[in-house]
Image (cartoon, rainbow, N blue to C red):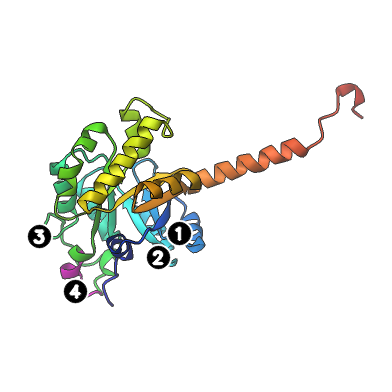
Amino acid sequence: MEMPVNQFKRAIASGKTPIGAWLMSGAPSTAEALGSVGFDFLVVDMEHTPIDTPQMIGILQAIAGTPAQAIVRPPWNDMVMVKRAMDAGAQTLLFPFVQNADEAKRAVASTRYPPDGVRGVAGTHRGSRYGTIPNYLKRANEEACVIVQIETLPAFDQLASIAAVPGVDSIFIGPGDLSASMGFIGDIGNAAVQDKLKEGAQACKRLGKPSGIIGMSPDMAGKFIEYGFSWVAVGSDMGYVVSRGQEYLAKMRGSAPAAPAKSQSAY
């Protein structure tokens, strides 16, 4: 069996603009459905959800049967969590709350086998297709894709040094946390926040580093592409469910006849 090729890593390096979505529900069927829709990537979020390693494996298996590429966001920049995710088959990792170049270096090292890093070596796991990929230990480092998440003003100030770390393939700017760091929590649309996001996208472009972001609507995601972001997620599985449910419920309540007064009731 051949080494799985990391198509997402190749896409962002080639200048394409992948469009994806976030996975929050922890349901393999939802991941499979969104992958079948045609999204280029799906982010398995283990930071802000109760998704654990066994659930992640099921989700990765579901995504594998679709055209989408999986990105796994571990709960923290922790070598043990990363080792388990990669042994489970993850090739692209999104590291939350990276504040400086040293933390970025630690993230890269956790995805690499020695001598390039500190990833522990095991012979039989899902990542190596249970040992059936003969050159896995030599090729795994090449196919690993590291995305580091910038989500505070102090980290934003370190953007150039973080982007310069060898092995960092992309920068992700978290709009929600960045807006909170700027004093505008819950107000991503604030003009100052939007200016900062645009500044980040343009800085990454000057540094030759692909940048990613999430927008909660097609309009906002489209604006982020105009700013210069290289890859964009638009909404999440749970967001789609809630917003569509609210839309349908509002329409039904708006068209339903008013409840009869008690005096008019047959009972």
At numbered mark 1, what does the secondary structure look like: helix, strand or loop?
loop
Q: Are marks 3 and 1 in contact (CB under 8 Å)?
A: no
Q: Amino acid at mark 4?
A: Asn
In the image, which residues are magenta?
A: 133-140
The earlier-in-sequence mark between 3 and 4 is: 3
Is 139 inside the magenta-drawn segment?
Answer: yes
Is 224 inside the magenta-drawn segment?
Answer: no
Q: Amino acid at mark 2?
A: Ala
Q: Are marks 2 and 3 in contact (CB under 8 Å)?
A: no
Say left or right for 60 vs 206.
right
At numbered mark 4, what does the secondary structure look like: helix, strand or loop?
loop
Rounded to the nearest angstrom, the CA distance separating label 4 from label 1 is 30 Å
Looking at the picture, does residue 76 appear above or below residue 121?
above
Q: Specify few, some or many for label 3: CA neighbours under 10 Å numbering under 14, 14-19, or 20 or more.
A: some
Q: Amino acid at mark 3?
A: Pro
Pointer 1: what residue?
Answer: 39
Pointer 3: what residue?
Answer: 114
At numbered mark 2, what does the secondary structure look like: helix, strand or loop?
helix
Pointer 4: what residue?
Answer: 135
Q: Nearer the viewer, residue 250 or 262?
A: 250
Of badges 4 and 1, the one in the foreground is 1
Query: Percent x, y for residue 245?
Result: 61, 43
Q: Which mark is residue 64?
A: 2
